Image (tube, helix red, strand yellow):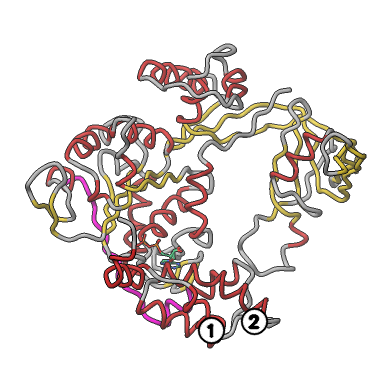
Amino acid sequence: MKIEQVQSTSYKKQRVAIHSHVKGLGLGPDGVATPISAGFVGQEQAREAAGVVVELIRSKKMAGRALLLAGAPATGKTALALGIARELGQKVPFCPLNGSEVYSSEVKKTEILMENFRRAIGIRVKEMKEVYEGEVTEWTPEETEDPLEGYGKKVSHVILSLKTAKGSKQLKLDPSIYENLVKEKVSLGDIIYIDANSGSVKRLGRNESYAKEHDLEADEYVPLPKGDVHKKREVIQDLTLHDLDVANARPQGGKDVHSLLNSLRTPKKSEITDKLRMEVNQIVSGFIERGVAELIPGVLFIDEVHMLDIECFSYLNRALESNIAPIVIFATNRGMTEIRGTDIRGPHGLPVDLLDRCMIIRTQPYTLEEVSQILSIRAKLEGIPVTEESLKALAEISSRTSLRYTVQLLTPAGILSKVAGREQVTEEDVKEADVLFFDAKQSAHMLAEQGDKFIT
Ligand code: ADP
């Protein structure tokens, strides 16, 4: 069976989840920031500057340059970088990397940087495929006894009905397709398509007739498909150069687009060498020439850039010159600090030649009001009902701890309120959650006081 859906960069996606409310930069057509828009609150000047950078990227004037976001922790640097990627297009890859991640005992620093550069370059492959497409109107897994598994029952097949504007069809599907449906988090009312050959499932969004039921921006709404349920359709798959490197490093099948996509499923890992990367570059150029693929430069976000050393900086200087480089965004919360690997101090811990290539945007601390608004957006997205007082209490906690800590405190506060049988998170739940958990400063303080009680 052929399967084409893969998400090799999934662990990076989890890190983006705390920013899932950020849908763009929230700028008006005149480039002016709307105070609360696209999930963004305040930070107007930085957002407007980021909007100018998006224009520069679109008009291909950022080549050889990078962006540096400088500001205190939790002032929205990552959110801004993600906002830039979202403004460039919903499917534009966003690859976050922490400066400290380049240090490994097994892999060279420059190798890790190179891998992340390639994770940040998207490639969109188009193919005509036979599919079943429509809105899910019925979905019943049929179960049989399974004496071997010990858990009693297993799914023998699934009955699934799909509806289009023209008609509907009931399908009897294999259990493996049931797993694909569960993985895609498909529910009734979603518009999906199933690849007739591979059985892979793609969720396109919810039927737009549901759009008014929720005021959350979280879901994408799509119209009911026209035509038959069973048809030929252009299927688009978004991959990164790194995904293809991984596929190509697995010796099996040919080097055409189908074999590469199939090899993505093999769990075997082999080393990706420069020679193999060159091969992928050539294959990709071939795809592009034949019109079946398109390159989508994404955003490589390097947080805590001062953690990189001089060897990495000279690599970056060269890599930025390459003709298929992603947009590189650095972030730091440091002022004058030592450039790692040298005994020289530099602004933000960066060498002057690299700093010279950077456009710098500063982020400012938030007011209590803005923090409450950010928390309110998060609470809505996570489906946690909160009172105004609890938001104020959280905002106050954030002034002594950090915004990130309070964003994360929302979930336990929600659980505490449910356990207590309350419908909304109250000030009391917030205070209780704050007592149960430690923020970074409290934890450091406790370690300093009781350090002798811990194993070092
Ligand atoms: P930094 O990268 O500067 O340390 P983050 O971007 O990680 O800060 O911000 C911490 C949390 O607050 C994240 O969940 C982020 O999405 C959210 N956040 C920060 N600034 C804003 C803002 N202006 N509007 C909405 N959410 C924000």
Residue 287 x %, y %: 52, 21
The CA span between labels 1 and 2 is 9 Å
Do residues under tags 1 and 2 come within 8 Å of each other at their CB atoms?
A: yes
Q: Secondary structure at mark 2?
A: loop
Q: Quadrant of the C terminus?
A: bottom left
The numbered disc on residue 424 is: 2
**Residue appearing at x 38%, y 32% in the figure:** 115
Relative to 231, residue 258 above or below: above
Residue 171 x %, y %: 89, 37
Q: Secondary structure at mark 1?
A: helix
- Can you tell me which quadrant of the image ligand 1 is in? bottom left
Q: In front here: 262 or 24?
A: 262
**Residue appearing at x 76%, y 29% in the figure:** 232
Q: Residue furthest left?
A: 344
Q: Which residue is mark 1?
A: 390
Membership of 372 in magenta stretch: yes
Image check: 453 left or right of 296? left
| Type of the residue with mark 1 | Ser
Magenta stretch, residue numbers: 356-374
The 10 Å Cα crowd at callout 2, few under 14, some 14 to 19, many 20 or more, is some
Residue 419 x %, y %: 67, 77
- Figure quadrant of residue 449: bottom left
| Type of the residue with mark 2 | Gln
Q: Is mark 2 within 8 Å of ligand 1?
A: no
